[in-house]
Image: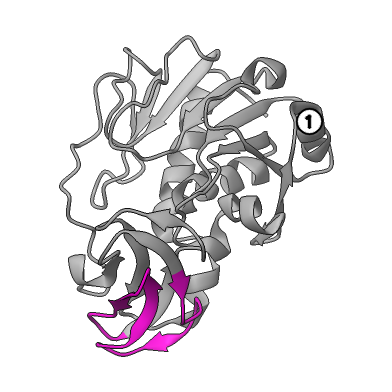
C-alpha cells in the first residue's frame, strides 16, 4: 500500500464501492462516518464497522479505529480504517492527498475545494471548478460514473433508479419516527405484504416480492419517511453480498478523476 491517502466522507454502499476500487488500485483509503450511520446495504458498506467493529467487503477489511495514528497504521496493514468523525476533525492529522465527499446528501454539507489538494464530490450538490475539483455522476443511465470537471451532476429526481423493472416500490421507508428493529435478515426472500422490520411499533411492509438487499441497523433513531430498507425484485441472493454495478461504475469515475488530477497510488 502506497503513502497516498484518500479520505472518503461517507462509507455507505456507493462510498464503499469507491473505497474498494481505490484500495484495489493501490491507494491508502480511510473513511469518516457519523455516530449512527443510516446505511442500508450493510453487508457491503464499510460504515458497518461503526456498529460491528469491523466488516469484510469483497476481501477488503474495514476496521473501526479511534484516532488518526491508528488509522494510518490500519492503512499500512492493507485495511480501510473507519473513524467516527462527522465534522472532519481528524483531517489535519490524516493529511489526505484527496477527499471524496460520498455522503450523498444531494447538497453540499460544507465541503470546500481548499480542504485537500484534490476534492471530489459524488452526485448533485457540488459544482466542479467551484467547491470541488471534480464531480462524479451518480444517476443511473448513460452518464453513470462520468467525471465532470466543469459544472454539476444531474439534479436529484427523487425517484429511485429502476432495478428489475421496479423503482419506488422497492424502497422501504419508515412509516413513523422511532427506533428501528429488523425481523428479516439481509438475503431473505420476501413476499409482498411481509413485515420486514418495525420502526417503534409501526410495521415496515414489503410492497413487492424479492430479496431483502438491505435493511438499516437495529437501534437507529430515524424520522418518518427515511429510507430503511431495499428489496431487489430480481431475487438473486448473492447480489446482497457484493458491490453493486452502480457503485463499481462510480468507483471507476473516482479513480479516473484522481489520476486526471495528478493523485497517483
Question: How many marks on residues?
Answer: 1
Q: Residue at x 45, y 63 (%)?
A: 216
**Quick one: label 1, few (<14), some, or many (20+) residues within 10 Å?**
many
Task: Give yes or no for residue 192 being in the magenta stretch.
Answer: yes
Q: Residue 232, position in %: x, y?
A: 34, 75
Q: Residue 101, position in %: x, y?
A: 45, 31
Look at the image and tell me in which quarter the N terminus lies: top right
Q: How is the image coloured?
A: one colour
Q: Which one is nearer the viewer's eye here, 148 or 236?
A: 236
Q: Is residue 110 above or below residue 138?
A: above
Looking at the image, residue 185 sits to the left or right of residue 177; the answer is: right
Q: Is residue 38 above or below residue 186?
A: above
Q: Which one is nearer the viewer's eye here, 148 or 174?
A: 174
Q: Residue 231, position in %: x, y?
A: 34, 74
Q: Is residue 113 above or below residue 64?
A: above
Q: Is residue 153 above or below residue 89?
A: below
Q: Which residues are magenta?
A: 181-209
Looking at the image, residue 253 sits to the left or right of residue 43; the answer is: left
Residue, disc 1: 72
Name the secondary structure under disc 1. helix
Q: Residue 192, position in %: x, y?
A: 25, 87
Look at the image and tell me in which quarter the C terminus lies: top right
Q: Residue at x 52, y 26 (%)?
A: 87
Q: Residue at x 64, y 62 (%)?
A: 58
Q: Residue at x 46, y 82 (%)?
A: 184
Task: Give yes or no for residue 153 being in the magenta stretch.
Answer: no
Q: Which one is nearer the viewer's eye here, 264 or 69?
A: 69
Amino acid at each position: 500500500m502506497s503513502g497516498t491517502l484518500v479520505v472518503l466522507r461517507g462509507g455507505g454502499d456507493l462510498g464503499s464501492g469507491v473505497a474498494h476500487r481505490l484500495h484495489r488500485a493501490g491507494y491508502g483509503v480511510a473513511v469518516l462516518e457519523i455516530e449512527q450511520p443510516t446505511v442500508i446495504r450493510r453487508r457491503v458498506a464499510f460504515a458497518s464497522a461503526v456498529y460491528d467493529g469491523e466488516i469484510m467487503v469483497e476481501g477488503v477489511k474495514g476496521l473501526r479505529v479511534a484516532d488518526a495514528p491508528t488509522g494510518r497504521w490500519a492503512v499500512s496493514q492493507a485495511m480501510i480504517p473507519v473513524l467516527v468523525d462527522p465534522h472532519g476533525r481528524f483531517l489535519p492529522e490524516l493529511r489526505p492527498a484527496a477527499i471524496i465527499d460520498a455522503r450523498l446528501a444531494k447538497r453540499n454539507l460544507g465541503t470546500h475545494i481548499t480542504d485537500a489538494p484534490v476534492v471530489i464530490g459524488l452526485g448533485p450538490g457540488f459544482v466542479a471548478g467551484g467547491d470541488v475539483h471534480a464531480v462524479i455522476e451518480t444517476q443511473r443511465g448513460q452518464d453513470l460514473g462520468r467525471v465532470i470537471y466543469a459544472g454539476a451532476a444531474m439534479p436529484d429526481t427523487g425517484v429511485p433508479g429502476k432495478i428489475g423493472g421496479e423503482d419506488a416500490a422497492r424502497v422501504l421507508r419508515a412509516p413513523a419516527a422511532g427506533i428501528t428493529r429488523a425481523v428479516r435478515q439481509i438475503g431473505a426472500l420476501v413476499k409482498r405484504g411481509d413485515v420486514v422490520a418495525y420502526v417503534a411499533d409501526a410495521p415496515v411492509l414489503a410492497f413487492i416480492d424479492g430479496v431483502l438487499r438491505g435493511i438499516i441497523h437495529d437501534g437507529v433513531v430515524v424520522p418518518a419517511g427515511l429510507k430503511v430498507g431495499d428489496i431487489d425484485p430480481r431475487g438473486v441472493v448473492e447480489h446482497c453480498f457484493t458491490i453493486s454495478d452502480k457503485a463499481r461504475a462510480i468507483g471507476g469515475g473516482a479513480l479516473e478523476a484522481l489520476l486526471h488530477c495528478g493523485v497517483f497510488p
